[in-house]
Amino acid sequence: MTTIHDDDVEARVRELFDRQASAIETGERIWGDAPHATVVNLAEHRSRKRWIGGGIAAFATVGVAAAVMFAFGVNGPGTVKTEPPIGSRTNEPAVSFVTNQVSLTADNFVITANGMQFTARNVELMVHSDPGGDDYQTLEVEWTELGVEQRLYIYFASDGNDWWATEIRTRNGHADADWIEYLGSRFRTPVGSAFTGSVDLRPDDGRDGRLEIENMRLMAFKPPAVCENPTSRYALFSPYSEISSGGYTAELLDTKTCKVVTGNAYDITWTAKSGDAEFATEPCDEGAPTACSYAGVAVNKNGIAHITAKARATGEVVAVLDVPMRDFGPPPVTDNPEVVDPNLVEVP
Amino acid sequence: MAAIETKSTAAASPPADFADFYRDAWPGAVRLAGLLTQDARAAEDIAQDAFTRVYPKWDRVENAPAYLWTAIVNGTRSWQARKHTARTKLPLVASAATTDFEFEMFGDLVAALPYRQRAVLVLRYYADMNETEIADALGCRPGTVKSLASRALASLKKGIEQ
């Protein structure tokens, strides 16, 4: 048996990839040469950004905020000012942006940019989070209003004890959209608690713009909802509230500790409850064995992914989870819905 | 290690239009898809599909090469989930230093790795991505990237030694 050093293996990997890449003939391609398309249905909206799924804001009343666990008090650095009610908008419906990781609800919300005011009301929102990890995650809200793209992105950090926002961005209200940035740490709050207060921010670089949020309740690094009011000993958790083609994880949590179950006692399987998809699964591969499954997903038709955790010894089902499944959808509606790019042809 | 062409364009001024981006990034995209799947036939389809996903967002995407990589990684992941007939092996450029036979066998070992282990190797040793970039592309934590790489190299080492 030949003994190989670790450095040798790495060197062989590099050489293999170099030699394979050099041998792949690619030729020259011109956009529009060959049929490469997807049918463009301009009447539908693209459902997600990149590969990250997210929840859709569905709540419409302030009463929903009661479901968000919050505590009062602001500690640490922050530039929040508690303002009197903003203008005459207090009769407007509340705003709610909620994902598995972050909740933002408020009585009023306005982005002022390019002389226009964006309220994110009566528009279709795309709300999602980059679930990140233990020290990073985001809240990303996107929509079209007043004929231009608008976004609210909040970036969060945590040291395990507290969480806080490190940066907020919105769009500048122009057709060729650019960012307006609100830099600096804000909303520092203990993990497990929500920040409450009103927000009135202007860009640090003196650009035209303003972000106002009245009576905001903001919580990042939320514990999984399945641990909040558990109805059973175990629960399946996936960081994404919607999946499309890509890679996703599902973890079996002990709802008493809200930790992933360790060991090899459980099998997690993925199937299409409705719609059509293919799943290639493997362990999550994070060191010691845990009840965690990673699935490469290919969605062929919108539907529901059904995830099941069973005890290996008895076959007993201990937890199930259904997650909406969406095919990577068509482009968003344009201002001129009759225009179809001539390079995009229908796949036969 | 030569960086993938799409990565190098991220530092330079972006091409004037999508057609220029497509022409310039196509070879690197095919190579990345080929290495991730270790299948010569799948590479062009996956690369083309990735560009098709980038095109509608061209005016809004901030970092087109990074978005393209992500689309390619996702595409190869979806491809992995589907059932396939026998793999179409990638060709090898001849080398005076090692025999093609040895490297073909080594290529088989790499192709037999679980997808994410193989993807970590490709993104680290071919695309020169750092741990955070790899974690972002695969949708996992940086710690998982280390674990995947370690297991992949250990499997390959065992395969070579046997």
Image (spheres, coloured by chain):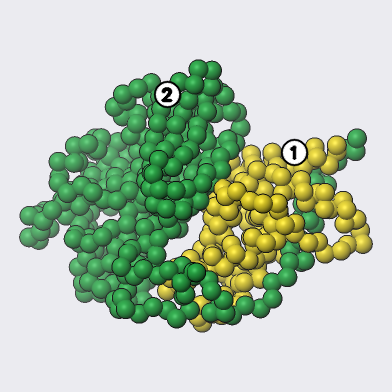
* Total numbered badges shown on the rendered structure: 2
Cα distance between the residues tagged 1 and 2:
34 Å
Q: Is residue A135 at least partly visible in the picture? A: no
Q: Is residue A26 at least partly visible in the picture? A: yes
- Between A337 and A151, which is closer to the camera in this rendering? A337
Q: In the drawing, what numbered circle is on residue B154?
A: 1
Q: In the drawing, what numbered circle is on residue B63?
A: none
In the rendered image, the vertical position of residue B31 relative to residue B132, given as above or below: below
Q: Residue at x 88, y 37 (%)?
A: A3
Q: Name the element at disc 1.
A: helix
What letter labels the chain drawn in yellow? B
Q: Residue A321's x, y, as percent?
A: 39, 35
What letter labels the chain drawn in green? A
Q: In the drawing, what numbered circle is on residue A318?
A: 2
Q: Residue A53's x, y, as percent?
A: 40, 50
- Between A67 and A238, which is closer to the camera in this rendering? A238
On-image quarter of the N terminus of chain B: bottom right
Residue type at mark 1 is Ala
Q: Residue at x 28, y 39 (%)?
A: A194
Judged from this view, the residue extending furthest toward the front is A348
Name the chain letter of the residue that bears numbered label 2.
A
Label 2 crowd bin: few (<14), some (14–19), many (20+), radius 10 Å: some
Q: Name the element at disc 2.
A: strand
